[in-house]
Amino acid sequence: MEQRQGFSFEEAEGWVRRAMDDSGEDRKYAIVVEGYAEPVGFTALYGLFRQTAPELGALIGDDVRGKGVGRRAEALTIAKAFDEFGAHRVYGRIPARNEVAKKTVAGLGWKYEGTMRAHLGRPDGVDDCEVWGVLPDEFRAAAANLLDEPDRG
């Protein structure tokens, strides 16, 4: 997990090139929403095909925050981890101050697993990072209604 102060055009181009390469152990997915000309964010699974569990990553654009877009995109990505890639669990690292992200994953069946103190370096100091995780049965029970919805994008 990283947090950036900025993202140059060249960095974005490089990120997109790497995202399109599916030969490694990471998978990235654009979040496409009807009515928007460009993707509104992305989700990712980092570290697939290892003995350890993959990590979920997400970036949701400001225009669609609070509308359930991120929650549904994360649910679809987690379902891929379990159903297509055979993951035995999925985890994520969340900045301790990011209450929205913690509420989102808790609603998808995730459990708080611990805190890495002073893990994130920030321009104004350091921040704690929380580890959250979910097992297939926990996720399916919590996200059944999201997975049953027709794809709207």
Image: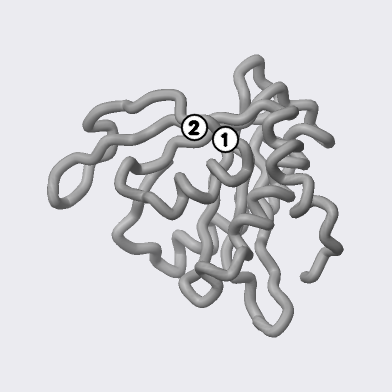
Q: Quadrant of residue 50?
A: top right
Q: Position of residue 46 (x, y in %)?
A: 59, 36
Above or below, 96 relative to 123: above
Residue count near mark 2 (Cα–Cα under 10 Å), binned few <14, some 14–19, many ≥20: many
Q: Identify the residue shown where x is 49% and y is 32%.
A: 132
Above or below, 63 relative to 95: below
Q: Position of residue 23 (x, y in %)?
A: 73, 38
Q: Which of the marked residues, 1 or 2, is nearer the chain's N terminus?
A: 1
The N terminus sits in image quarter: top left
- Disc 2 designates what residue? 132
Residue type beneath disc 2: Trp
Secondary element type, mark 1? loop
- Contact flag, marks 1 and 2 (Cβ < 8 Å): yes
In the orientation shown, which residue stands out farthest toward the top? Answer: 51
Left or right placement of residue 127 versus residue 67 in this view: left
Residue type beneath disc 1: Trp
Left or right placement of residue 54 versus residue 8 in this view: right
Q: Nearer the viewer, residue 106 or 12?
A: 106
The C terminus sits in image quarter: bottom right
User: Residue 101 bears which disc, if any?
Assistant: none
Q: Identify the residue shown where x is 38% and y is 33%.
A: 130
Secondary element type, mark 2? strand
Q: Identify the residue shown where x is 58% and y is 40%.
A: 56
Residue count near mark 1 (Cα–Cα under 10 Å), binned few <14, some 14–19, many ≥20: many
Q: Quadrant of residue 119?
A: top left
Q: Position of residue 19 (x, y in %)?
A: 63, 51
Above or below, 129 relative to 53: below
Q: Identify the residue shown where x is 70% and y is 69%.
A: 32
- Disc 1 designates what residue? 110
